[in-house]
Structure formats: structure tokens, C-alpha cells
Image: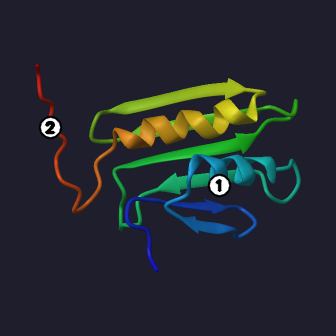
Amino acid sequence: MTATYYRADSENGDHIDDPSEEALFVLTGDLNTTGNTFVVIQPGEDDPSWSASAAVTDDGGHEVVRRDTQRHGHEVMTSHDRGEIAQDPTIWMAARTYPGRPASTSTYF
């Protein structure tokens, strides 16, 4: 099965299609400073317009980098809270565009 929205790939070869926040929590928990230093999350398409990555820092924390070429966005955040490191890209990715996904609509009451 291929990813419907996005995929996560870590440096050590772990791969998850459409990972949940919990799966990202596990992937970031497996990061270390030797052979598994980062996880990249992006749509499963050629030349994706956005990506997010989480990397372990030398002081034991994590850095999340979010890029969106359609919106000219580049943001970096750091934290020692693994829950925040998994939650931040999950929320951010919910606002990204995906091939085949219907456009979001809002209704005002």
C-alpha cells in the first residue's frame, strides 16, 4: 500500500505511509546521534512542494524544519519534548495540499 497523503522515512531505513502522531513519536524516539539522525516527512510524489524533517541535536533535543515552496515557507523549531516534536509537524501537515484531496471549505454560521 502506498501513502495516501504523506510518508515518513528515517535515516536508518524505517518507512511509514501516512504516519500518525504516535508513529512520529516512535520514529523521533528512535533517533540518535550516530546512525539514525533524522526523519523526513513528505508527500509520496515526485518533486514534493513541502516537507518536514526532525533531527536529533547534539544536546539530546530535536529540531524540526518545515518547508513549503508553494507558500514560500521555511520554519525551524527546537524542543526537548518528544511529544511536541511529533505534534508540531502533524498539525502543520494537516494544512498542506495533497494530490486528489478535495479542497477544504468553510461554512460560516
Mark 1 secondary-structure assignment? helix
Q: Residue at x 12, y 28 (%)?
A: 107
Q: Residue at x 16, y 47 (%)?
A: 103
In which quadrant of the rendered view does residue 96 lie?
A: top left
Q: Which mark is residue 105?
A: 2
First in sequence: mark 2 vs mark 1 = 1
Model colouring: rainbow
In which quadrant of the rendered view does residue 14 lie?
A: bottom right
Q: Which mark is residue 61?
A: none
Q: Residue at x 44, y 76 (%)?
A: 2
Q: Residue at x 27, y 41 (%)?
A: 70
Please state, as top left, top right, bottom left or bottom right, where the C terminus lies in the image. Answer: top left
Mark 2 secondary-structure assignment? loop
Residue 40 picture location, percent across and down: 58, 54
- Give the answer, above or below, for where 84 lies relative to 108: below
The CA distance from mark 2 to mark 1 is 28 Å
In which quadrant of the rendered view does residue 27 lie?
A: bottom right
Q: Which mark is residue 23?
A: 1
Q: Are marks 2 and 1 in contact (CB under 8 Å)?
A: no
Residue 102 picture location, percent across and down: 18, 53
Q: Amino acid at mark 1?
A: Ala
Packing grade of label 1 (10 A; few <14, some 14-19, many >=20) is: some
Side of 97 where 102 appears, left or right: left
Side of 33 where 84 appears, left or right: left
Residue 82 picture location, percent across and down: 74, 36
Q: Nearer the viewer, residue 29 or 50?
A: 29
Q: Amino acid at mark 2?
A: Thr
- Give the answer, above or below, for where 108 lies relative to 92: above
Residue 42 picture location, percent across and down: 46, 55
Packing grade of label 2 (10 A; few <14, some 14-19, many >=20) is: few
Q: Nearer the viewer, residue 109 or 11?
A: 109
